[in-house]
Image (tube, rainbow, N blue to C red):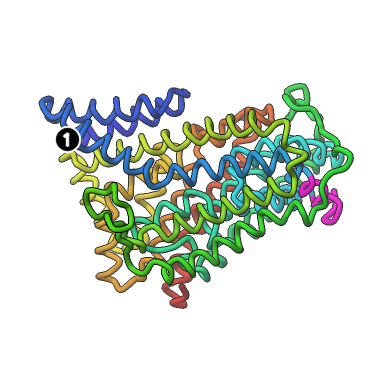
């Protein structure tokens, strides 16, 4: 019975997310409903002592990353930098390689720190025009955007500032650059297999006589008509500069922060007389977060300095929208994290943990656990947060017992979070299809193909580690 209660809570949250209800509201309802069925008297103490404690802790750690990432992405969009990068990619790579162009542009923006959702809105008008001019069926476009924005640059490529690569740093005391060789190998495998799959789908569709305006992908559904490039766009190299700066600064700060602060830093009343007690910050658990925050802040400052004239009139409204989006995204994931903390405390979760322990290999165990919860919740960061809130200690003990570096565990967990997360109820998938004016029936097959490739890439990386010992 206790297992069924946990399962019911997970299914309830999944259905609520799929139907479009707020996870911020329904995560505590699902969690406390499970507590009510287990021990009615514990509902209020669990809410205050576990759910809210976990939720607030998540916001404390990660909200600045959500906020700075959203603001940076919005400024890249408002400045015309994203548009300039797309136009340059089309010019230099060629319209005949439409899939490669879209994947490359999405990858550059995502790895440069732009939010996944912002990438979808920024790239779509130009992707639509490119597909139209190449007469490629429009229904294939979401697969290309998903490969570029929702896969290897989200959680696999070392140093990516996306939240899916940052969350594991606080649990495993690693950095965003964990397991660089495995990350690069996994990224190359995902990219190569994904592009091969997209090209096979394109050739198959066009061999049947499908075109952009074919019945299989009605252009009438287009919510955003093609957007020709504006005159006077910034130079592509200038447009790339903030993205490059974020990557370089992230790497540099990751190396420098430990030297600046040591293992811990104590705030005392000698330096801050208003303090009533010493505040000690363990540096190793926040290196990855601080490095990404500093890098994104530098990217924002460079964008403002080099494109102030372009963003001056829209800065206020644009940043307000970015802050609102960051609040919503952070609170959604924090609610799921609180949900995971509550579920982990229930007796029914012990049977789940025991079942997962039947998978003897620590890396496979972690990958299956994380990708399963990401699939159930429809969220990479949410599923990973639930899994790590409930099982991170178990993962660490198993890795240490098997003498597996925690850097490898970090990379496997991050990659697994972006595996089965893109099931039909995933928020990014729903947004992508809404922006492109397509339906699940028309385009989800290609997105699911990328989902399978990304999931298999996790186990490919695990195999590479055991065969070569590379980290």
Q: Is residue 86 one of those drawn in magenta? A: yes
Whether residue 172 is visible: yes
Percent across and percent down for residue 210 are 80, 36
At horizontal 77% and vertical 47% (from top left) the residue drawn is 86
Percent across and percent down for residue 258 are 41, 68
Where 115 falls versus 283 (above or below)? Answer: above
Whether residue 358 is visible: no
Element marked by disc 1: helix
Identify which residue, 135 or 284, lies in the foreground: 284
Pointer 1 residue:
2
- Image quadrant assignment for residue 279: bottom left
At horizontal 80% and vertical 42% (from top left) the residue drawn is 206
- Image quadrant assignment for residue 320: top right
Q: Residues within 10 Å of mark 1 (few under 14, many from 20)?
A: some
Percent across and percent down for residue 370 are 38, 49
Where 443 falls versus 155 (above or below)? Answer: above
Task: Check the image and name the residue furthest to the right.
Answer: 231
Q: Give, as a single range, the part of the protein colored magenta.
A: 84-97
Give the left or right position of residue 226, taking residue 109 as reference. right
- Image quadrant assignment for residue 32: top left
Q: Is residue 274 one of those drawn in magenta? A: no
Where 233 falls versus 40 (above or below)? Answer: below
């Amino acid at each position: 019975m206790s297992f069924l209660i946990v399962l019911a809570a997970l299914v309830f949250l999944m259905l609520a997310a799929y139907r479009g209800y707020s996870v911020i509201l329904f995560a505590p309802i699902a969690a406390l409903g499970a507590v009510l069925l287990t021990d009615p008297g514990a509902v209020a103490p669990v809410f205050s002592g576990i759910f809210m404690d976990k939720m607030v802790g998540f916001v404390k750690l990660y909200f600045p990353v959500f906020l700075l990432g959203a603001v940076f992405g919005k400024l890249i969009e408002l400045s015309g930098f994203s548009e300039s990068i797309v136009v340059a990619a089309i010019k230099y790579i060629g319209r005949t390689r439409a899939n490669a162009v879209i994947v490359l542009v999405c990858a550059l923006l995502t790895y440069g720190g732009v939010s996944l959702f912002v990438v979808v809105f920024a790239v779509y008008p130009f992707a639509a025009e490119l597909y139209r001019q190449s007469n490629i069926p429009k229904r294939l476009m979401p697969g290309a955007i998903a490969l570029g924005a929702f896969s290897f640059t989200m959680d696999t490529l070392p140093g990516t500032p996306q939240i899916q690569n940052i969350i594991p740093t606080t649990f495993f005391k690693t950095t965003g650059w964990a397991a660089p060789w495995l990350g690069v190998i996994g990224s190359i495998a995902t990219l190569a297999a994904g592009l091969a799959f997209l090209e096979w789908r394109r050739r198959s569709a066009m061999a049947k006589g499908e075109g952009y305006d074919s019945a299989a992908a009605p252009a009438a559904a287009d919510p955003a008509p093609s957007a020709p490039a504006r005159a006077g766009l910034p130079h592509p190299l200038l447009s790339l500069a903030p993205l490059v700066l974020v990557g370089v600064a992230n790497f540099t700060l990751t190396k420098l922060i430990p030297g600046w602060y040591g293992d811990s830093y104590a705030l005392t009343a000698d330096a801050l007389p208003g303090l009533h007690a010493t505040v000690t910050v363990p540096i190793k658990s926040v290196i990855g977060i601080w490095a990404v925050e500093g890098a994104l802040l530098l990217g924002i400052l460079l964008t403002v300095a080099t494109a102030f004239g372009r963003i001056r009139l829209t800065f206020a409204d644009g940043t307000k929208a970015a802050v609102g989006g960051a609040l919503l995204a952070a609170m959604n994931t924090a609610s799921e994290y609180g949900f995971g903390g509550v579920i982990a405390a229930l007796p029914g979760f012990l049977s789940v943990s025991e079942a997962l322990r039947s998978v003897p290999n620590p890396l496979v165990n972690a990958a299956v656990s994380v990708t399963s919860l990401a699939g159930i919740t429809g969220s990479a960061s949410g599923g990973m947060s639930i899994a790590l809130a409930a099982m991170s200690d178990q993962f660490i003990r198993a890795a240490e017992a098997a003498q597996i570096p925690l850097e490898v565990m970090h990379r496997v967990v991050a990659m697994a979070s972006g595996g089965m997360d893109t099931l039909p109820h995933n928020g990014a998938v729903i947004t992508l299809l809404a922006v492109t004016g397509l339906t699940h029936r028309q385009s989800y097959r290609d997105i699911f193909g990328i989902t399978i490739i990304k999931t298999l890439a996790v186990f490919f990386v695990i195999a590479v580690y055991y065969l070569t010992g590379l980290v």
